[in-house]
Amino acid sequence: MTGYSYACISTHHLFDHKPDNLLKTGHKHHLSGFYKFGTPGVAIAWGDADCIDDFMDTLKRAMPQKKFELVFLRPWKLETRPQEWNEVQPPTLKDKLVKLGLPEDDYYTILGVEKKDSKDDTGGKSQGNGKGGKAKGKGKKK
């Protein structure tokens, strides 16, 4: 895939120390976007698809144990995009993505979590353990 793209690269966890801080080097691959240390560790990158592939290859070669995965790689057709490569925290990330015109669902996909529905599926009732509500153990003998 060639052309200007938008991608999410993820791994289980990354911390701000060597070699994990290689995540900070996206700009050296002519990328702009955001990266987040923690669980999960992610990079959200805008740039030429070949540059994104090179960055992904660099991360995989330097840290094979991290098992980086390309969550998605999509063509980018909007004019707005990040101009720098910066660290971001989850609440700030959501705001930045919305300002760029991305669907809210992408935020949840990037972090690997399901979007919570605002409705309570239980109808306000306790679901219990499904065992009829009887407690285990011995009761008083009569």
Image (cartoon, grey):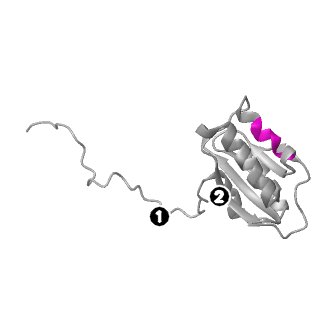
Q: Is residue 128 left or right of residue 89?
A: left
Is the residue under label 2 in contact with that under label 1 (CB below 8 Å)?
A: no
The part of the chain drawn in magenta is 22-27
Observer-nearest residue: 104 or 54? 54
Give the labeled residue for mark 2. 109
Q: Image quadrant for the N terminus? A: bottom right
Q: Residue furthest left?
A: 142
Q: Residue at x 88, y 59 (%)?
A: 81
Dot 2 alpha-carbon crowd within 10 angstroms: few under 14, some 14 to 19, many 20 or more: some
- Which kind of residue does numbered mark 2 sit on? Thr
Q: Residue at x 9, y 37 (%)?
A: 141
Q: Secondary structure at mark 1?
A: loop
Give the labeled residue for mark 1. 123
On residue 92, the disc is none
Q: Quadrant of residue 53?
A: bottom right
**What x and y, as percent, mark residue 12?**
60, 43
- Which kind of residue does numbered mark 1 sit on? Gly
State whether residue 21 is above or below residue 8: above
Counting residues from the start of the chain, the first of labels 1 and 2 encountered is 2
Q: Name the front one of labels 1 and 2.
A: 2
**What x and y, as percent, mark residue 49?**
78, 60
**What x and y, as percent, mark residue 136?**
22, 41
Q: Residue furthest top?
A: 17
Give how far apart the Cα atoms at labels 1 and 2 are. Answer: 27 Å
Q: Is residue 11 left or right of residue 124?
A: right
State whether residue 43 is above or below residue 124: above
